Image (tube, rainbow, N blue to C red):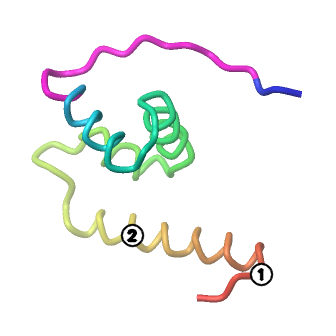
Amino acid sequence: MPSKRVIMRLEVVPGTPEALARVVDEFGSTNVSVVSRLLLWLMNQSDVTQACVLGLYPGGAPPDILKIILEQMKVEAGKKDHKNGAKR
């Protein structure tokens, strides 16, 4: 059964389409797949990571928050690897 798709229009700042085109060309993907995967990745992150990526910390994210985010990502990656039987 095919998955349902939702089409969304996005407003981006100048220069974004060109930067996206470079990524798409480099990895041989499509605009839709790159943006879709990035959004899916963001929605699956913790609130802290989402806030950091969205620039919600005044003056930039404090270094200790960045360390916490990296540690959370390591733990989550380890859980996924363990679940899938992979070793690091």
Where 85 sits versus 32, above or below? below
Q: Residue 7 appears at what percent x and percent y?
A: 56, 13
Please tell me which residue is depicted at 32% across the width and 72% down the height of the picture: 67
Where 19 sits versus 69, above or below? above
Circle nearer the viewer, 1 or 2: 1
Q: Mark 1 points at which residue?
A: 85
Question: Which one is nearer the viewer's eye here, 32 or 62?
Answer: 32
Give amino acid for label 2: Leu
Please tell me which residue is depicted at 57% across the width and 46% down the height of the picture: 44
Question: Which one is nearer the viewer's eye here, 52 or 26?
Answer: 26
What's the magenta bit mostly, secondary-structure-wise? loop
Numbered circles on residues, count: 2
Please tell me which residue is depicted at 49% across the width and 13% down the height of the picture: 8
What secondary structure is found at the residue carrying circle 1?
loop
Q: Name the residue under label 2.
A: 70
Q: Toward which corner of the image does residue 14 lie, by quadrant?
A: top left
Please tell me which residue is depicted at 58% across the width and 71% down the height of the picture: 77
Q: Toward which corner of the image does residue 81 lie, by quadrant?
A: bottom right
Q: Residue 23 appears at what percent x and percent y?
A: 31, 44
- Which contiguous range is marked in magenta? 4-16
Left or right: 67 in relation to 58: right
Q: Residues within 10 Å of mark 2 (few under 14, many from 20)?
A: few
Left or right: 38 in relation to 61: right
